[in-house]
Amino acid sequence: MRARRLPTAALGLAALLIGACWWATGPLVAHGREQPVAGSRLGRVGLAAGVRQTLAEPLFGLLERVIANHGRPSSPAERQRSPLPADAHRVVHFVSPQDTDPAIDQFLQDHYALYNRAVPQNGKLFVFFPGTFARPSDYQWVLDEAASRGYRVIGLEYPSTTANPRQSSVVQLCTRDADPACYGRVREARLRGGDLGGLDSVTPANSIVNRLVRLLGYLQQQYPDEGWDAFMPGDQIDWSRVAVGGHSQGGGVAALIAKQYPVARVAMWSGPADYVPLAGTFATWMLEPSATPIDRYYGLVHESERGARGILGGYAALGLDRYGAPVGVAASTPPSPDAHVLVVSLPPRPRPVPMPDPNHGSTAADGLTPLGDDGRPAYRTAWDVLLGP
């Protein structure tokens, strides 16, 4: 049966249900470390919580259509939709994954590649990974903010789900598995290709690494004067010139890459929180030594998102607790650039349809992140701490 094309408005809503599906499979965290959060209503955060979120059948049906939508290329009309104000200096390339490698046959929505000609370039590439079910087009404010900091920027479309929305996110696949290595296996399969515990598999062509390599090669070939070759001399990515970031599941992708390669910076929005309740520990990969110095890791979380305590615990497991307590962000005062974990608290933008956990999406996603009086994201100064100079 041919999948029905999801209306754009419904797609935008469903793609932002990242939080609901991230925590959809029962108890997630149960650990005992505590840490104060300066300037936040969380106060003393007891990092011991049980999170359960059940999604109604109609919502799962909607998510099935979102997954199906990833299986087709972006349309010209979709490429025209953007929350960003016009900027004559902004250069954006919409790239179909299949144009970079015909062997890519899943997750075919556009990659985004952009930079700003009016901003002095910092010589680094920022690669952003969306959350579960979401697309690069759902994070245009974050991508544009990175470009305003002097980065060349890529928003990467990648295999973030299986065909079954009930067993798609990393947490859904592993939270009931007692093996602390489960999370690492699932993430590694999506990073390089492999089996997802018998539920699904990712071919090497569809993997994150191949998509990024092929995209950089495509950009070098199509736009030889734009400098994309600086980040991949030959056929190997120069990770020392790459900053990685992501939202929710995408934050875990960024952290996993940073564990394996010495990247320039790690920016994590609302993730990861790969905790193993049945073993009473975080995932093995989170506790392993990092090829990237820990002082290059930065994280942000909303104090009221349902997984906040687990995410704060995940940041601590990665080693960010050595830089002091998480810092609450006041709307009127830019956060200190020395902070490594930021806690935001503004209410998300209202949606016409109720959402299970809008605070989770509001830390980064276009449709939910709060806007200031100037019409731009209220969290820009917090994002700038994550993105760095």
Image (cartoon, helix red, strand yellow):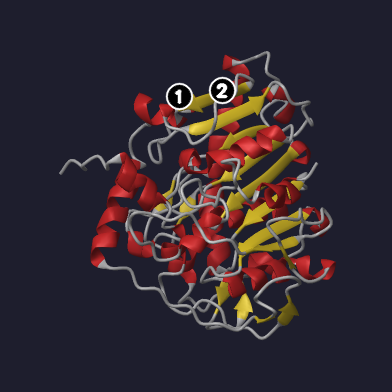
Residue that label 1 marks: 99
Query: How many numbered badges does the structure rendering display?
Result: 2
Extreme-front residue of the structure: 373
Q: Position of residue 18 (x, y in %)?
A: 45, 58
Q: Amino acid at mark 2?
A: Tyr
Above or below for 25 versus 386:
below
Q: Position of residue 115 (x, y in %)?
A: 65, 27
Q: Residue at x 37, y 63 (%)?
A: 167
Q: Residues within 10 Å of mark 2 (few under 14, many from 20)?
A: some
Q: Is residue 250 among what the camera can see?
A: yes
Q: Position of residue 202 (x, y in %)?
A: 44, 48
Checking the image for residue 218, the label placed there is 2
**N-terminal-most mark, 1 or 2:** 1
Q: CA distance from mark 1 to mark 2?
A: 8 Å
Q: Quadrant of residue 156?
A: top right
In this rendering, position of residue 233 left or right of residue 282: right
Q: Amino acid at mark 1?
A: Asp
Label 2's element? helix
Q: Position of residue 322 (x, y in %)?
A: 83, 69
Classify the position of the C terminus by image quarter: top right
Label 1's element? helix
Q: Residues within 10 Å of mark 1 (few under 14, many from 20)?
A: some
Q: Residue at x 68, y 13 (%)?
A: 225
Above or below for 357 versus 214:
below
Above or below for 20 versus 102:
below
Asked whether the beta carbons under mark 1 and mark 2 sit within 8 Å of each other, the answer is: yes
Above or below for 341 versus 138:
below
